[in-house]
Image (cartoon, rainbow, N blue to C red):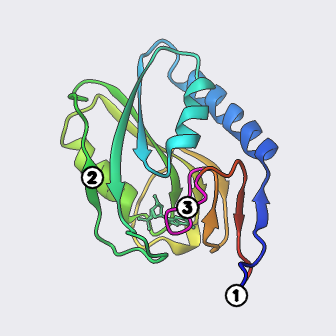
Amino acid sequence: MPKKTLETLFTEERIQQRVQDLGELITQDYRGKELTILIILKGGFLFGADLCRAITIPTYIEFLGVSSYGHEEKSTGIVQITQDLKYSIAGQDVLIVEDIVDTGRTMAYLLANLKTRKPRSIQACTLLNKESKRCVDGLELAYTGFEIEDHFVIGYGLDDKGQDRNLPYIGYYPS
Ligand code: 5GP
């Protein structure tokens, strides 16, 4: 059966504009500090690459590999670190950069895990947020690009069974 057509949710232009706005906001908030931008792989790689170029204060860029879905569309609830940090984040101002927060389990796990490493501060930034799907209490997201409804979204870092992360826009298959 041929694949259905992907419905565009956010165009490339809309994403880039929002990323610029977030970059300016983060720059203002961390003015006078050095920021460690922690890009979560794989989904956060495009957002992280664009966001860090929209931030104009001094930064360190680090990557953390996390797996929570495998190749399925549903969260397994088990978060696995597939590629850990090479350096200590103790005493640093850290910003976690994620593609999407859905149930919130991954971000809650990351915040809890990384706080034990004694950063000076730690905040979360996500491009997309599915607030209606939240399964954890009290998750604080300092920066959110867009609130979205319960669609399985694809593109701009987000995969469809491993593929289509390279699409410059974000879309979903209508049911
Ligand atoms: P959570 O732990 O918040 O349920 O899920 C976080 C992770 O699940 C995200 O980093 C992302 O990898 C994956 N995920 C959640 N929703 C979607 C979605 O709509 N599309 C894609 N491609 N991945 C998603």
Horizontal side of 169 relative to 51 (left or right) equals right
**Nearest-to-viewer mark from 1 and 3:** 1
Dot 1 amino acid type: Met
- Indicate the quadrant containing the N terminus: top left, top right, bottom left or bottom right: bottom right
- Please state which amino acid type lies under the numbered disc 3: Gln
Q: Nearer the viewer, residue 128 or 160?
A: 160
Give the alpha-carbon distance from disc 1 to disc 2, as whole Å: 34 Å
Cα separation, mark 2 vs mark 3, equals 19 Å
Residue at the spot of label 1: 1
Q: Earlier in the sequence, mark 1 or mark 2?
A: 1
- Residue type of the residue flagged with mark 2: Thr
| Secondary-structure class at tag 1 | loop
Work out how far the residue at label 1 is from the one at label 3, CA to CA, in angstroms: 18 Å
Question: Could you tell which of marks 1 and 3 lies nearer the N-terminus?
Answer: 1
Q: Is residue 155 left or right of residue 93?
A: right
Q: Position of residue 135 (x, y in %)?
A: 42, 73
**How many residues crowd around disc 1 within 10 Å: few (fewer than 14), some, or many (20 or more)?**
few
Specify start and end residues of the magenta stretch as a single range: 157-165
For label 2, the residue is 82
Disc 3, SS:
loop
**Residue at the front extreme, as displayed:** 1
Residue ID at (24%, 43%):
84
- Relative vertical location of residue 137 with respect to residue 100 in this rendering, above or below: below
Residue 163 — which label? 3
- Residue 66 sits in quarter: bottom left
